[in-house]
Image (cartoon, grey):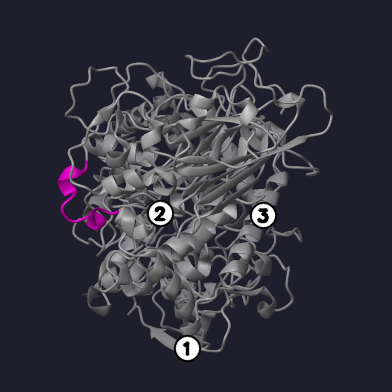
Amino acid sequence: MPRVPSVDASFIHTLHGNFVDNAGRTLLLRGVNLSGSSKAPVNQPSQVLDGFWEEAKTGSESFVGRPLKLDDADEHLARLRGWGFNMLRFPITWEALEHAGPGKYDYEFMDYTIEILRKCKAHGFKVYMNPHQDTWSRFSGGSGAPYWTLVACGFNPSAFSATQAAIIHCEYPTPASRNPAELPAMIWSTNYGRLVSHTMFALFFGGSTFAPKCIIDGVNIQEYLQTHFANAFGKLAERVAAAGDLLDEVVIGWDSMNEPAEGLISWNDLNAYPVEQGSTLKKGTVPSPAQSFRLGMGQVQTLDNYTFGSMGPKRDGSVTIDPNGVKAWSDPSTEPGGIHPRWGWRRDPGWTLGTCVWALHDVWDVQSGYVMQPDYFARIPGTEEPARFLHTFFLPQCALYLKAVRAHHPQAIAFVQPPVFARPPPIPEEILQGRACYSTHYYDGLTLVTRHWNWFNADALGLLRGKYSTQIQALRIGERAIRNSLQSQLGYLKADATQLGALPPTGPARYPTIIGEIGTPFDMDAKRSYGYTDSGKYKGDYSRQERALDASLNAADGENCLNWTVWTYCPDSSHPWGDGWNMEDLSLWCNDDLRAGEMGRVPGIQTPFKSSLTISTLPVYSSLYANSSVEEGEPVKCEPASLLSFLTNGARAVRAFCRPWPIAVVGTPTNIQFDISKATFRLTLKVNAEDIPVDEDDDIVPAKKGLYKDSSLPTEIFLPLVHFASDACVSKALGRDEPRFIRNDDTSRVYVIDAHSSFDFSSCASRQSYSRMTRTTSLSLHPEGRVELLASEQKLLWFYTVPTGEKEDKELTIEVRRSSGAIKASALGLGYTTESRARDGCAGWLEQAGLLGEGWCPQGCSIM
């Protein structure tokens, strides 16, 4: 690793495809999205209609309390830190910042956000801010933009449900016969293929090109919207900068717009829906753009209807939609004299309200319904130049936004996120400025949509990118094949990072990749894990979710060695309503999953540290119990058994996401392997002379606080209690003893290590220090090294010699496994046994496939 610039101790660099700390160690940043709950105000989850339109029309909603209530923040952040996370993706909607009207900012919410960020700092997190949206806005069935942006574009949002311009959860299926609990899984994402999203994204990214008549306050609607968006997040960055102790120390960068969509831009034929299954789901009614145009003007249309099963989308008939003359466009009377009475803008006389903006631009004729220019969006109007969304429209908007943010946060890392599954365009260095990251998303789509962990899957990304000539070639059968396929798909995404920072892109990636969203639904199989089926037989059994989530996160390991932030952690998640948004249910923790009799043991949290500590030195937890005799400022740790109980209580599929991984590596990690069924972790890395850790004076880093016995920094590995706790620790974790505290690193009570013959015993500082660890976990080092355990931080420190003269990379490997085998899920209070999980995993799959008794198993197992 090349020497890094001499800067503040909290700095994180983006060099040679990796995040790097000041000492030159490669960092892996892994964590969670905090939070999915931030998509809506505290008292307005998406299923609630009361107040939904009223507050929107006055701009009186408030997002104060998102993502966490201030009084509860320490408890939630301590839990996340205890799971090993060191990174938070921090979704904030444009609506939260500018809901009161154009240019009217919610400074109370910004200041509240700063208080939450200070809490994140106290718990040792790094954060990247995420301007979050889904299908444009809450008022078009998703999240993101303020209500007034829709009105500015000429829409009448209260008519969206009647015209199917958008499917809105609180009005599903119709405002007159609401039953929001019946909203089908992922149906919200079909809004990307409906009138509102199609139009809003086309205007936002390409209004100057495709809608030149749309002038408001003297500028085109594209400039109007993009400027307000950039200024709102620029104002937040300014406020965070003014706080004085957060930029770079906590907030290391800013994501571009979450999952931006092309809208109509590049659409080849407005009369047809694409044959290929892209990022827009075919489920329920599927209108073509032309049909959406007509519906928006109140005209009756008959639409194709689709179901989505284990084999993907399938047409199952048609549905006739009659808006009864209701239009999705605002009546001219709502803006007397061309001025909006509430929001104050002046609309150009050439922009006539009450008519579809695409009819105004002669794309189609309202009276006949005929589309006169079906390829209008395929090329730049008046030319033969193809409309290239990423290069011509996405990139300038991204640059404008980054300029606004970096005016107040000059060293911000630019987390660049193109549309889902799209390769980013080549991005020049003058935009990235040496500090960037490719921020992409990945979900196992079949599991996400079907809400079931299937015995087969497909290489969906390979199929979309033309790797196969037929769909059957992309099919993968059996868990092993599925896991390999997921890992390959994440490898495709990692390779996309070569597009950043070079024109044309050549050689290895210059910048790192982070999977900004990855996760799995917890309401699988008709919510059987909540006891909603089979007379409650499977209540608390998250074995299927564990397998699905482990497969996805395992895909980020292997040779990919990726950074990630799981979607999501919602402090108000519930079994009936999931994450409180469109029936999504992906939260890693849920209050409804707290173990009976332990609710009173959920600890109050205090943070006894007075000084600001770095990501490498801050203990994972401050103090897990407020009622202690510890003086303020004294770093007290909770007893491991009490900590283990806390970390598993309310957690879902905790063994999948609370997993071992290298936090900081002297060298570069090349392969990460973790077998959840055997509790075996293996890390391979390469190291050379350039990887010698250095301080700001280019000297070898000295020992710190007497912790390290070598002259160099170690590689740090998170070693979670969830997988590597001693039997004594596990057996006590679910007991009812009063919590007590330890003031030292009494590792013998937490971990057990049996030396393999390959362990370089001669490199140990002393037999005594090594023998203290020889009781529960098996460890081997190839070919050399010395380890120390920090039980209070669930961390293993690995010291080894860095070559000083060799030109070739040196390869090192460490393996850690629990010598008595994996901890049973039932021992952790997770509601299922290893045996039932195995039976469910094999015989259950065979039964689904109709192969039970055929003598084979797609997983290669012997349970028959």
Q: CA distance from mark 2 to mark 1?
A: 47 Å
* Residue plotted at (36% across, 47% down): 727
**Three-letter residue code for mark 1:** Asp
Residue type, mark 3 in image: Gly
* Residue 757, image x, y percentages: 63, 41
Residue 63 position (above or below residue 54) = above
Distance in Å between CA atoms under marks 1 and 3: 35 Å
Provide the secondary structure element on which disc 2 rests: loop
- Residue underneath mark 2: 823
Q: Nearer the viewer, residue 208 or 447?
A: 447
| Residue type for callout 2 | Ile
Q: Position of residue 171 (x, y in %)?
A: 27, 68
Q: Secondary structure at mark 3?
A: helix
Q: Nearer the viewer, mark 1 or mark 3?
A: 3
Seen from the viewer's position, the closer of residues 474 and 62 is 474
848 shown above or below 596: below
- Of marks 3 and 2, the one in the foreground: 2
Q: Are marks 3 and 2 in contact (CB under 8 Å)?
A: no
603 or 333, nearer to the observer? 603
Q: Nearer the viewer, mark 2 or mark 1?
A: 2
Can you identify the residue that label 1 sits on?
316
